[in-house]
Image: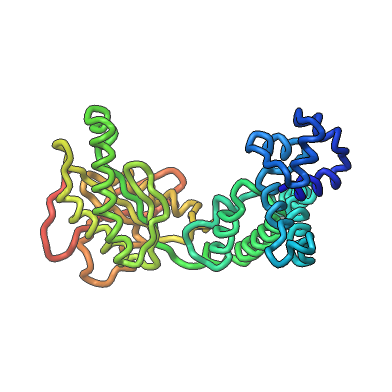
């Protein structure tokens, strides 16, 4: 540790008297610490790191890099490789270089949007961003900033080429629990959380089983996407059947479900645009226990896949003439609230 303190002091251009005064030590004490004759306590080490303008972690790493191995004790100096490693760490943590790289990335690529968007799709660039952001933590290194710049640029290029968004049909599903908000006020937080857990366990497995993806959870509902309309409808039927077994504190949840087939704009792990709004409005317009779909969904279903009844539907932002249908599983009668 003493060698690291002496080396950092020299690089900062501080004399022993200046550093000793800054950390309220006598010069002989500081010299003893630098010579390895006296061990500094944690309070003194923190004060020294602050005075040397380096994180305590960097001071410890510097000490580890400079500490001689047993076969180096006689020479009294570290190997060239270890000195180079210590120099590389200092370069990587140089605050001026880190800030320069960060500023250039934000000016050219628009900030840290990758932190929010590299989420659920599992593309190689998304996974790389996730891992690099996780490794970076609160300590922003120069090399890390350069790596994030490259990965963010790759994501922007992918988006500019419309990879994975806006080019293929996607079935968008929204669910909502009828009367949950008013019930939860009287039932309390514990019961409400228990209900939401059971509802999640009931409706999310069918999404996965039918090759869909949960995009986000919306309190007492969720948004999911599927690559075909039939899978979305089958998942909705299965979810409604499974939720029938759920009951908490006398409350038996009923789902309102809406599905629309469109080409929403995909950004990271989320979807945006008019088609998403239409699916959400269909869910809002559905009655308790009802599945309400757009005409585009109904047209894509195989013959006999579901019983369909046309319903009048209008919503702000929806195309004129958009029709909606109430779907029920074919082959069995299903009572619904009117």
Judge by depth and name the residue closer to the eye, 7 or 39: 39
Q: Find residue 302 and report its image quarter.
A: bottom left
- Residue 225 in percent (x, y) is at 39, 59
Residue drawn at (47%, 59%) of the image: 120
Q: How many marks?
A: 0
Could you tell me which quadrant the C terminus lies in?
top left
Q: Is residue 75 above or below residue 99?
A: below
**Name of the residue lying farthest toward the bottom:** 303
Q: Position of residue 182 (x, y in %)?
A: 26, 31
Q: Which x, y percent locates residue 331?
A: 13, 65
Q: Is residue 63 left or right of residue 311?
A: right
What is the x, y in percent for residue 122? 49, 65
Q: Note whether 120 is above or below 311 in the view shown.
A: below
Taking the image as drawn, is residue 95 in sight? no
Q: How is the image coloured?
A: rainbow
Q: Is residue 136 visible?
A: yes
- Establish if 202 lies above or below 82: above
Residue ID at (28%, 39%): 193
Nearest the viewer among 144 and 277 is: 144
Task: Examine the rendered structure and indicate whether residue 44 appears above or below residue 336.
Answer: above
Return the residue nearer the eye: 177 or 279: 177
Classify residue 87 as left or right of residue 229: right
């Amino acid at each position: 540790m003493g060698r690291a303190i002496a080396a950092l002091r020299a690089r900062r251009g501080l004399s022993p008297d200046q550093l000793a005064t800054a950390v309220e030590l006598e010069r002989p004490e500081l010299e003893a610490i630098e010579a390895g004759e006296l061990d500094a306590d944690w309070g003194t080490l923190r004060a020294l790191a602050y005075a040397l303008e380096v994180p305590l972690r960097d001071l410890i790493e510097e000490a580890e890099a400079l500490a001689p191995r047993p076969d180096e004790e006689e020479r009294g100096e570290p190997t060239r490789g270890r000195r180079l490693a210590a120099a590389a760490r200092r370069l990587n943590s140089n605050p001026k270089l880190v800030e320069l790289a960060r500023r250039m990335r934000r000016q050219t690529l628009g900030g840290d949007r990758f932190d929010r968007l590299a989420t659920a799709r599992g593309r190689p660039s998304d996974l790389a961003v996730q891992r690099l952001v996780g490794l970076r933590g609160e300590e922003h290194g120069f090399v890390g900033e350069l790596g994030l710049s490259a990965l963010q640029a790759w994501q922007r290029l992918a988006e500019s080429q419309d990879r994975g968004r806006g080019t293929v049909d996607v079935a968008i599903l929204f669910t909502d629990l009828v009367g949950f908000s008013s019930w939860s006020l009287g039932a309390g937080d514990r019961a409400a959380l228990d209900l939401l857990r059971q509802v999640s366990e009931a409706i999310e497995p069918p999404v996965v089983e039918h090759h869909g993806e949960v995009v986000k959870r919306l309190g007492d509902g969720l948004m999911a996407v599927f690559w075909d309309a039939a899978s979305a409808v089958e998942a909705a039927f299965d979810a409604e059947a499974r939720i029938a077994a759920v009951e908490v504190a006398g409350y038996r949840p009923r789902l309102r479900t809406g599905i629309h087939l469109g080409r929403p704009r995909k950004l990271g792990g989320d979807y945006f645009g008019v088609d998403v709004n239409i699916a959400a409005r269909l869910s809002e317009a559905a009655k308790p226990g009802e599945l309400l779909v757009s005409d585009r969904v109904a047209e894509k279903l195989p013959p006999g896949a579901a019983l369909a009844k046309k319903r009048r539907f209008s919503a702000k932002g929806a195309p004129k003439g958009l029709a909606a249908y109430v779907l029920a599983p074919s082959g069995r009668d299903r009572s619904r609230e009117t």
